[in-house]
Image (cartoon, grey):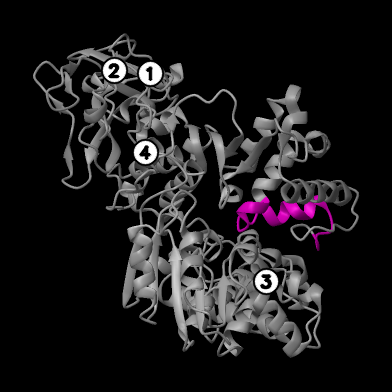
């Protein structure tokens, strides 16, 4: 069963056959591959009492309308909060709120300064110590452990990489405070808030068995250890469904059940019904860097292309900062811009709280409730342990709360026929639009990761933060049904070419001029043979290179496609006009650790099998960032030779 076929696909039939065995089943489903219709098919085949659960409340609410009546649809947080409230009588405010560092410092009567006998470590102020204690408790709450121990002690705020006696010293101070805080949180007659993670942990520790014959866990890639501990105690059949490459909430303790859980049976959904082959090809190019091996197949009945989108239905940004920048650039059509009802309401509440806090009045939003002033918020942000709050502060400090309130209030509700949705990658999860534009800020995080690779050996490719950025980009890219416009630098980085209309065989409109980098090879799509697309047989025209970003032009010089790491090779005796050493931007095949760019005797670069040498080498100043081109051996335009 799916939106485009009157009968189940072969993959869905296989999943149904495995489900009927009654054993636990794991279904790996790519983006848009019919998860909901497959789960509905499975649910309809068994009339027994079942539970459908997902992390996202909107997804759970939609499923209530789609699944048969014998299936209960709910988030596990809703189940947990109801259980804890009924069993212990916690008030709604204690379940919903979370303690702030100042409240924790006051409750625990923390000293003004705490000194550890560790070299190069400054004394901790009370607020800093409170923040570390709270982080330690949170580590316990997001684990499957039943007791709070030294392994949960937080290593942030300058306490990273502590080992042996130093770690034991910190743990000896932190643990007693952390245990007191957890006891206070779970005290029925107390006043310290339990919070979402707190009641969820309490439910995980106390609850034994759910009254269902079958449990369908959707979005399993963003589960958490307490939930997996609960499911491990169940006697009923469990179906784990998710896309391991859509895990985007690891920053708040989520784990990928699709890679951690072991089941006897496993199946896959690789045929996407949302979009056509060009977008499917692009998406697979992205997740290949994460180890994906089974290709994502596009819907042959849908047209799709990758290129410039002039009339988007949605603009997706990586950050809230970029979201507001996009809105600010469109003030002349702000009445057509929509943030969605929930996001608009939440943002206005937080911004109005900023106004109140600057007047030292009480705030009402979950994010800002409990702070005494806006300065108090900034002091918490300076601790460096709340990236979401830091991002919000930066947004307010950049634009000003009054301008932001004005922008948000002038946006529309989304009910207009010509409305353009504006959202972030995280909020776009579970949604889809016909024509989508991804903002340029998606590349920023990739660039930061690459530039932070000080060893220049491509080790950032194994960094969890970098991998999560790849997954976020994949999520955002796969929100499009028909057309998607991607940042030029990421088109190059992932070797994504301009597409063709898969159904009609027509060439897509040209990509924006910024993508037409000189000397860039485009990857030959698998359908090029069938369509007779001769344009794919040659590299892009090599006119005079215009390099605005070194990775934008160098990112796709390799073929065949491979996992690529960028590294800098320092050239002795060459310096910038500012006096700083120049570095040559090159690429390495991380599988074989050999240079793909072979420099011949003429000092040219061979950019691919059978390719003509490209007689430029791009160098970058480590100081001012200025770019240079090596024209011939020992000669660099504008550089100093020592």
State which tag comes first along the sequence, 3 or 4: 3
Name the quadrant containing residue 64: bottom right
Task: Decide if residue 461 is in sight here.
Answer: yes
Tag 4–tag 1 contact (CB < 8 Å): no
Residue at 56% in and 51% down: 429
Which quarter of the rendering shows the C terminus? top left
554 horizontally vs 440: left or right: left
Q: Secondary structure at mark 4?
A: helix
Where is mark 4, residue-wise?
277
Name the quadrant containing residue 16: bottom left
| Magenta segment boundaries in residue numbering | 369-389
Where is mark 2, residue-wise?
540
Residue at 43% in and 53% down: 33
Q: Secondary structure at mark 3?
A: helix
State which tag comes first along the sequence, 4 or 1: 4
Tag 2–tag 1 contact (CB < 8 Å): yes
101 horizontally vs 174: left or right: right
As measured in the structure, the alpha-carbon distance from the residue carrying label 3 to the one carrying label 4 is: 41 Å
Task: Examine the structure image and report whether residue 447 is included in the region drawn in magenta.
Answer: no
As measured in the structure, the alpha-carbon distance from the residue carrying label 3 to the one carrying label 1 is: 49 Å
Residue at 38% in and 21% down: 579
Tag 3–tag 4 contact (CB < 8 Å): no
Q: Secondary structure at mark 1?
A: loop
Where is mark 3, residue-wise?
196
The nearer-to-camera label among 2 and 4 is 4
> Any mark on residue 516, and which?
1
Tag 3–tag 1 contact (CB < 8 Å): no
Give percent across and percent down for residue 387.
61, 53
């Amino acid at each position: 069963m799916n939106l485009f076929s009157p009968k189940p696909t072969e993959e869905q039939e296989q999943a149904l056959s495995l489900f009927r065995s009654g054993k636990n089943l794991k279904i790996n489903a790519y983006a848009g591959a019919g998860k909901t219709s497959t789960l509905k098919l499975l649910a309809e085949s068994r009339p027994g009492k079942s539970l459908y659960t997902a992390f996202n409340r909107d997804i759970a609410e939609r499923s209530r309308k789609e699944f048969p009546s014998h299936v209960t649809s709910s988030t596990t947080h809703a189940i947990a909060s109801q259980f804890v409230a009924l069993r212990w009588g916690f008030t709604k405010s204690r379940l919903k709120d979370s303690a702030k560092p100042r409240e924790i410092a006051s409750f625990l009567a923390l000293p003004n300064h705490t000194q550890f006998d560790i070299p190069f470590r400054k004394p901790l102020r009370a607020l800093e110590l409170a923040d570390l204690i709270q982080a330690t408790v949170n580590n316990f709450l997001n684990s499957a452990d039943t007791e709070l121990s030294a392994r949960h002690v937080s290593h942030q705020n300058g306490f990273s990489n502590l080992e042996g006696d130093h770690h034991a010293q910190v743990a000896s101070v932190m643990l007693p405070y952390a245990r007191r805080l957890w006891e206070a949180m779970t005290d029925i007659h107390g006043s310290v808030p339990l919070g979402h993670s707190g009641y969820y942990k309490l439910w995980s520790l106390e609850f034994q068995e759910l009254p269902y014959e079958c449990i369908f866990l959707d979005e399993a890639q963003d589960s958490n250890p307490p939930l997996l501990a609960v499911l491990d105690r169940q006697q009923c059949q469990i179906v784990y469904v998710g896309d391991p490459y859509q895990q985007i909430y690891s920053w708040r303790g989520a784990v990928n059940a699709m890679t951690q859980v072991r089941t006897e049976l496993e199946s896959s959904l690789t045929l996407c019904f949302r979009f056509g082959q060009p977008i499917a090809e692009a998406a697979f190019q992205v997740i290949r860097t994460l180890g994906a091996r089974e290709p994502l197949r596009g819907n042959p009945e849908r047209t799709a292309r990758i290129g410039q989108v002039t009339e988007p239905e949605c603009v997706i940004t990586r950050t809230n900062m970029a979201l507001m920048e996009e809105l600010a650039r469109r003030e002349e059509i702000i009445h057509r811009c929509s943030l969605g009802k929930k996001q608009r309401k939440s943002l206005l509440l937080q911004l109005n709280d900023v106004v109140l806090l600057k007047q030292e009045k009480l705030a009402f939003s979950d994010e800002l409730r409990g702070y005494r002033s806006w300065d108090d918020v900034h002091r918490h942000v300076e601790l460096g342990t709340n990236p979401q709050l830091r991002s919000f502060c930066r947004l307010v400090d950049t634009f000003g709360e009054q301008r932001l309130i004005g922008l948000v209030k002038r946006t529309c509700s989304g009910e207009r026929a010509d409305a353009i949705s504006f959202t972030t990658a995280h909020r776009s999860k579970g949604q889809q639009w016909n024509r989508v534009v991804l903002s340029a800020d998606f590349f920023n995080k990739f660039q930061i990761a690459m530039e932070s690779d000080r060893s220049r050996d491509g080790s950032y490719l194994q960094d969890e933060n970098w991998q999560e950025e790849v997954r976020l980009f994949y999520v955002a890219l796969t929100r499009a049904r028909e057309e998607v416009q991607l940042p030029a630098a990421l088109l190059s980085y992932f070797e994504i070419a301009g597409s063709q209309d898969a159904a009609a065989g027509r060439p897509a409109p040209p990509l924006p001029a910024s993508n037409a980098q000189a000397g860039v090879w485009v990857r030959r799509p698998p359908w090029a043979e069938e369509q007779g697309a001769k344009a794919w047989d040659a590299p892009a025209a090599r006119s005079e290179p215009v390099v605005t970003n070194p990775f934008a032009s160098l990112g796709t010089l390799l073929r065949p496609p491979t996992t690529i790491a960028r590294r800098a090779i320092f050239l002795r005796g060459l310096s910038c006009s500012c006096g700083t050493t120049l570095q040559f931007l090159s690429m390495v095949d991380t599988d074989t650790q050999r240079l793909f760019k072979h420099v011949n005797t003429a000092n040219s670069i061979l950019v691919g099998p059978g390719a003509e040498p490209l007689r430029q080498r791009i160098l970058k100043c480590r100081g001012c960032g200025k770019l240079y081109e090596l024209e011939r051996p020992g000669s660099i335009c504008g550089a100093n030779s020592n």
